[in-house]
Image (cartoon, rainbow, N blue to C red):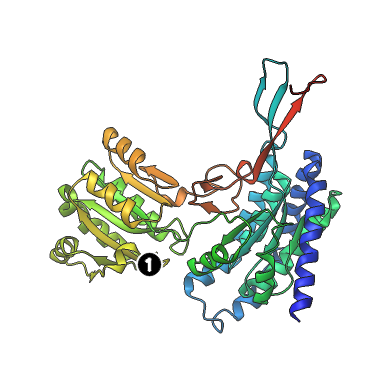
């Protein structure tokens, strides 16, 4: 059985590599046509996709999924419409391939051009996130990369249905079907094989919980682009507009609490804690958020009649992915910056302040993939950044950082033109 799986996955990778070479030189109009066809098929197939998704949802409780995980895997008509719109936005973006990044002529007349090209074959490994199937397929098609998708067992029925639409859309545009392939098994052994096919797959991007991402990073012989956690902070400065701060904190925590760019940690400057904490605490409590507080914030909230729980040391570095937030009072901007850099995950962090100098220092000193001034951390997202979608959010420092769109899915090569040049 293991040999059969190894043969299956290896064959998928071999076909993907061949397809990637054809896709890399395909005309932009064909890639855009495939995406337009896919968006239309999603719109027309909503009932088909929702039925497949319901089969997965019916098994979610038996599989021990949390409410946040169930929310991520659920498809609705609204989410499918947004997914189709996302595909159309990707199609509308400029073609990244062939862009000349640098050009120079050497003193000897040799002409050098640095040109954007696809990475090649990308493996995407993800859990209960059906939108990843479509987002990754769309971005890879547009950027000329073949992609191998390995989703979790929790959404196997949904992924299979989506993969069928993607395959039909690719073929209708005259592109090789093998440029997007779904591994047709949930057997963990297939993942073990995939992570060692470095002669065919050029990059692995895991999307899921920390356990999955660490497993991939530790077991892959292929370069991995990743983030382990989204321990995201909102710092409310002493010069903050309190109404704005309340709105941003509530949005960052509650708009969709089970995602990686949701706020998990709240820091409040001591100079405004007495005025701000009771109002934001009441607003968060009204949304069902549990407040886990340090001594200073607990005392202020308690005096205002707002319930909280004592925070443990672990709470101050936690990614809750739920309606829970850890709250601390800090004495200065510098203390806030140090706390974010020490306890955060370099993902998405925000300052709320009317003080431009304080904001500038926070933006410069916080070492995260995306840092926000007077805006919710929920905006660290490929769609919101205008990328159409994202294939992932990277907290790495090499190749890509932040939401990965079309340009981040490209490498480059040097094109060198001579007139009979030889090196002496």
Q: Nearer the viewer, residue 203 or 278?
A: 203
- Which residue position is annotated with label 1? 323
Q: Quick check: 78 above or below 413?
A: below
Residue 416 coordinates in the image, percent (x, y): 74, 27
| Residue at the image point whose x is 35% and y is 38% from the top | 364
Q: Quick check: 365 above or below 349?
A: above
| Residue at the image point whose x is 43% and y is 66% from the top | 321
Residue 198 coordinates in the image, percent (x, y): 69, 58
Residue 263 lies in what quarter of the image?
A: bottom left
Image quarter (top left, top right, bottom left or bottom right) of the C terminus = top right
> In the rendered view, does 41 fall on the left or right side of 70?
right
Residue 133 lies in what quarter of the image?
A: bottom right
Residue 128 coordinates in the image, percent (x, y): 58, 69
| Residue at the image point whose x is 78% and y is 23% from the top | 422
Residue furthest out toward the front: 424
| Residue at the image point whose x is 67% and y is 59% from the top | 123
């Amino acid at each position: 059985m293991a040999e059969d799986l190894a043969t299956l996955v290896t064959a998928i990778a071999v076909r993907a590599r061949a397809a990637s070479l054809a896709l890399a030189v395909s005309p932009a109009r064909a890639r855009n046509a495939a995406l337009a066809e896919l968006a239309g098929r999603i719109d027309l197939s909503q009932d088909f996709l929702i039925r497949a998704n319901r089969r997965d949802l019916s098994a979610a409780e038996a599989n021990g999924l949390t409410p946040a995980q169930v929310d991520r895997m659920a498809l609705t008509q609204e989410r499918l419409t947004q997914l189709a719109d996302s595909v159309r936005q990707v199609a509308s973006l400029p073609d990244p391939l062939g862009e000349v990044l640098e050009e120079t002529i050497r003193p000897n007349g040799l002409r050098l051009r640095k040109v954007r090209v696809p990475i090649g074959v990308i493996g995407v490994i993800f859990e209960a996130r059906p939108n990843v199937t479509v987002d990754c397929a769309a971005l890879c098609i547009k950027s000329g990369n073949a992609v191998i998708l390995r989703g979790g067992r929790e959404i196997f029925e949904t992924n299979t249905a989506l993969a069928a639409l993607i395959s039909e859309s690719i073929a209708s545009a005259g592109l090789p079907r093998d440029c997007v392939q779904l591994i047709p098994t949930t057997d963990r052994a297939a993942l073990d094989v995939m992570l060692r096919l470095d002669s065919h797959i050029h990059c692995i991007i895991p999307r899921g919980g920390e356990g999955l991402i660490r497993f991939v990073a530790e077991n892959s012989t292929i370069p991995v682009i990743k983030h382990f956690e989204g321990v995201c902070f909102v710092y409310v400065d002493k010069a903050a507009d309190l109404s704005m701060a309340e709105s941003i904190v509530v949005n960052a925590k509650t708009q969709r609490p089970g995602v990686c760019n949701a706020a998990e940690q709240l820091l409040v400057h001591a100079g405004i804690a007495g005025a701000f904490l009771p109002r934001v605490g009441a607003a968060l409590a009204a949304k069902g958020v549990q407040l886990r507080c340090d001594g200073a914030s607990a005392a202020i909230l308690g005096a205002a009649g707002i319930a909280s729980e004592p925070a443990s040391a672990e709470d101050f570095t936690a990614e809750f992915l739920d309606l829970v937030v850890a709250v601390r009072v800090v004495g200065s901007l510098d203390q806030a910056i140090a706390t974010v850099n020490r306890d955060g995950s370099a993902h998405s962090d925000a300052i709320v302040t009317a003080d431009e100098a304080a904001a500038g220092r926070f933006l410069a000193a916080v070492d995260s993939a995306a840092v926000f001034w007077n805006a919710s951390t929920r905006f660290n997202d490929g769609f919101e950044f205008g990328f159409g979608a994202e294939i992932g959010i990277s907290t790495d420092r090499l190749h890509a950082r932040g939401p990965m769109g079309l340009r981040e899915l490209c490498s480059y090569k040097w094109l060198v033109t001579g007139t009979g040049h030889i090196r002496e």
